[in-house]
Image (cartoon, rainbow, N blue to C red):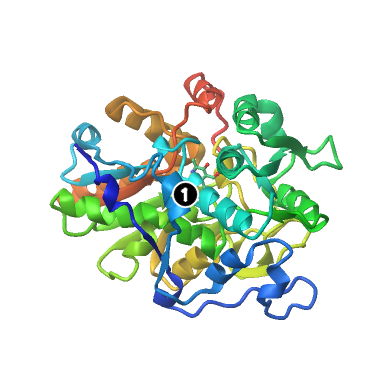
Amino acid sequence: MRIHLPAEQIPTAWFNALPAMPVEMAPPLHPGTREPIGPDDLAPLFPMGLIAQEVSTEPWIEIPGEVLDILRLWRPTPLVRAERLERALGTPARIYFKDESVSPAGSHKPNTAVPQAFYNKAEGINRLTTETGAGQWGTALSFACTQYDMDVKVYMVRASYEQKPYRKILMETWGGEVVPSPVDDPGHPGSLGLAISDAVRDAVSRDDTHYALGSVLNHVLLHQTVIGLEAQEQLALAGERTPDVVVGCCGGGSNLGGIALPFMPDPSVRLVAAEPASCPTLTQGKFDYDFGDTAGMTPLMQMYTLGREFVPPSIHAGGLRYHGDSPIISALVHCGRMEAVAYPQGKTFEAAVQFANAEGKLPAPEAGHVIRAVIDEALAAKELGEERVILFSYCGHGFLDLAAYDDYLNGRLVDA
Ligand SMILES: Cc1ncc(COP(=O)(O)O)c(C=O)c1O
């Protein structure tokens, strides 16, 4: 069962979680003075349009028409009821997923790449820098920049740059310049924290350049709320009142925030984050101020963190290998509004393959984490004889991650 929202019902405003948060958020701190930062401190990196969104207390923020025109290339995305998976599990639960894999880049990331490029272009910026792990975010930003005729330089974690050439080719096809990171240490496999340092260093060194981040920050989660807002309309079309539980995988928190935040004000809806056991930020990290990058150049944010020098093992879900997490998601977990679970990667591939066989879709390794959590929720519902309604974010396809499936299917996967 696929539920399509008519094109004219695409959301025209983003849902801002900040005024709806059940707890007060601690302010970001300047990396030098450790005092709360102001808009001017962020101006070398971001346009004022995004800085304003980062701190806005307006409950809704209008989506510019020029952004909607590009989002319409693939939005609204389908909501799919995973009936064949339900049957395979023998569960009374009803499982729905929001299919973000239909975007040009194959994941949810273009939902924020497009508005980020738009607000930069609107303020006269013609070049962006960014980091990318496995390549999903760099791909999305390259797509967005080519829409606005902007240059983009992507610092790609060296291990991925060397092992995963296809995402690099996609970025280059869309006009992106891709270099391995860390730039100054060719023997180092790299990490997201180091690549952020490289991208920020580049951006602050040139007047024509800003930096773009694909997750973590408030404005990124804001842009992703189109996922949850569309899902609310589609669940109503499917005759469902409200989900019992909303689940997303969590790297920096953007697809999880996108699907879960519009449901946050309803206390009857459980919110669940799924993360890797080898990078267990929410389940084992410290709730504290930390830098977003390894070199300590970014503002400090209050979040769950494994420490900025933590280098996670190179699991296949590259998008989930980050030492920190979104301050919004961290605050929700810390106050008990959101639950978090962690899985070793073998369990996530087992779930991904089960999903691929039941539904026919091949998940990105990141999506394997949310599917693991969803299957466990559905089996718990079966155990209890409960008609649980489960909604999850199918955050990306795995067509460029086939080497990971090859490792899993041939017993070479390290079960970190
Ligand atoms: C397909 C996919 N899912 C999930 C993530 C995790 O990021 P986030 O937690 O910001 O959604 C990534 C990050 O690159 C990704 O590429």
Q: What residue do we see at 50% from left, 56% from top?
A: 253
Q: What residue do we see at 71% from left, 74% from top?
A: 40
Q: What residue do we see at 53% from left, 62% from top?
A: 219
State the quadrant of the N terminus: top left
Residue behind mark 1: 111
Who is closer to the viewer here, 338 or 108? 108
Q: Tell me if 23 is positioned left or right of 278 in this view.
A: left
Q: Position of residue 64 (x, y in %)?
A: 45, 58
Residue lying farthest to the right in this orientation: 184
The answer to whether 59 is drawn above or below residue 86 in the figure is below
Who is closer to the viewer here, 183 or 55? 55
Amino acid carrying mark 1 in the image: Asn
State the quadrant of the C terminus: top right
**Total tally of numbered discs in the picture:** 1
Q: Position of residue 380 (x, y in %)?
A: 25, 49
Q: Position of residue 103 (x, y in %)?
A: 43, 38
Pointer 1 local density, CA inside 10 Å: few below 14, some 14–19, many at least 20? many
The answer to whether 220 is drawn above or below residue 318 in the figure is below
Residue 354 placement: quadrant: top left
Q: Is residue 140 visible?
A: yes
The answer to whether 232 is drawn above or below residue 346 in the figure is below
Q: Tell me if 306 is positioned left or right of 374 in this view.
A: right
Who is closer to the viewer here, 308 or 39? 39
Q: What residue do we see at 58% from left, 61% from top?
A: 285
